[in-house]
Image (cartoon, rainbow, N blue to C red):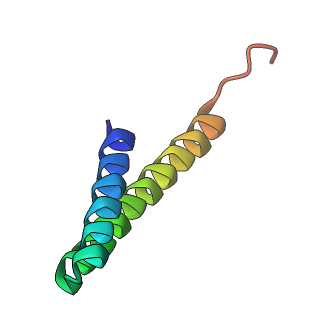
Amino acid sequence: MAGDDSTMDKLKGKAKEAVGKVTGDSRLEGEGQTDQTKGKAKDAVQNAADKARGAKDSLTRKDDDA
């Protein structure tokens, strides 16, 4: 599931960023920020797909009352 995947990226990124800050490893900190951004991007893509699916459904819905 995409939601789980994006959540995992964000959590992994937060952990990497925190470890990078504590150890002074700017590369690891940067990787963490990148992972978080990747997770947020996956969320945005999924939300856009959901909205597009909803719009399509509302345009193609057949009214039984007509």
Q: Which quarter of the rendering shows the C terminus?
A: top right
- x%, y% of residue 64? 74, 14
**Is 12 left, or right, of 55 in this rendering?**
left
Q: Is residue 40 above or below residue 53?
A: below
Q: Which quarter of the rendering shows the N terminus?
A: top left
Question: Of residues 64 and 25, which is closer to you in this image?
Answer: 25
Q: Based on the displayed image, in which of its 4 quarters is residue 36 positioned?
A: bottom left
Question: Of residues 18 and 60, which is closer to you in this image?
Answer: 18
- x%, y% of residue 35? 28, 66
Residue at the far right: name it: 65
Q: Is residue 53 above or below residue 65?
A: below
Q: Residue at x 31, y 77 (%)?
A: 21
Q: Is residue 56 above or below residue 16?
A: above
- x%, y% of residue 62? 66, 24
Q: Residue at x 30, y 63 (%)?
A: 13
- x%, y% of residue 44? 47, 59
**Is 66 left, or right, of 59 in this rendering?**
right
Residue at the far front: name it: 22
The image shows a total of numbered marks equal to 0
Q: Is residue 62 above or below residue 24?
A: above
Question: Of residues 50 and 59, which is closer to you in this image?
Answer: 50
Q: Based on the displayed image, in which of its 4 quarters is residue 18 positioned?
A: bottom left
**Is 6 left, or right, of 28 in this rendering?**
right
Q: Residue at x 42, y 61 (%)?
A: 40
**Is 8 left, or right, of 53 in this rendering?**
left
Question: Of residues 45 and 37, which is closer to you in this image?
Answer: 37
